[in-house]
Amino acid sequence: MLDKVNNDISKQRKYMDWNNMLIHLEALYVLDNALTEPEDDDLRLIRKYETDNMIKYIVDNGAGDKLTVLFTETAVLIKGFAHENSLNQFAAGEWNQGIIDMMYDGLDEKMKNMFTDDERQETTFFIWYDGEVHQNQIEGNDGGRWLLGYAFGTYERFEEFATDYYDMVFDNDLLRKLYTYSALSELELSKLI
């Protein structure tokens, strides 16, 4: 089983992984997928889409906030939408497309087109990483960067979130293994949940 886990990680490593963000989002995806019944698909916290040239995770908290992280072989694209943020153009008195366009300014057109027009409209912050971090700050507003917390920079944050969100106590060793390797055997997963 460990060989399969290492092979899966190696396969994912062909994509940029800004500080293990891909592994941590995959761990959340595996956990959420295991704990969300098929009939409750609309309650799913995180979704994953994969093609030959990218892996995309969309975290939707169901309260109007969304984090989209797209991994390619050359860049990591991170788009956040915090519905209560002042940069939310849907809540603005008058739509200002210039604010959204400014967030994507400097991004290669090919990368920009990885998001539909509708997806780009749902933006209160945008970051891309291609070996260095790029973000066009708008009036000092972070645009809801707190959404990056779903990428869980530490195991302790992942464990705290999982325990609170799913209202469960998990086997610490198995949860740590999931966080570290983004995979568990079927037996381990059944013991975890």
Image (tube, rainbow, N blue to C red):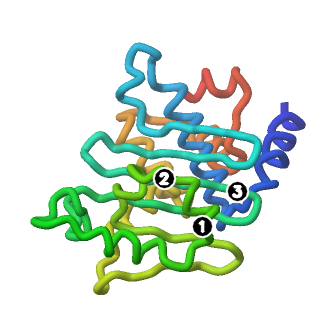
Identify whether 40 is placed above or below 59.
above
What residue does disc 1 label? 109
**Marks 1 and 3: in contact by CB < 8 Å?**
no
As measured in the structure, the alpha-carbon distance from the residue carrying label 1 to the one carrying label 2 is: 18 Å
Residue, x 57% and y 73% (percent of image)?
107
Percent across and percent down for residue 49 are 60, 38
Percent across and percent down for residue 13 are 79, 54
Residue, x 48% and y 26% (percent of image)?
35
| Residue in the foreground of this view, choosing between 143 and 96 | 96
What residue does disc 3 label? 72
1 or 2: tag closer to the N-terminus: 2
Identify whether 165 is placed above or below 82.
above
In the image, farthest residue toward the left: 93
Percent across and percent down for residue 138 are 33, 81
Badge number at residue 69: none
Identify whether 59 is placed above or below 77.
above
Q: Secondary structure at mark 2?
A: strand
Q: Is residue 125 left or right of residue 154?
A: left
In the image, farthest residue toward the top: 39
Residue 106 image-quadrant placement: bottom right
Q: Is residue 182 left or right of residue 148?
A: right
Query: What kind of residue is marked 3?
Result: Thr
What residue does disc 2 label? 68
Query: What kind of residue is marked 2?
Result: Thr
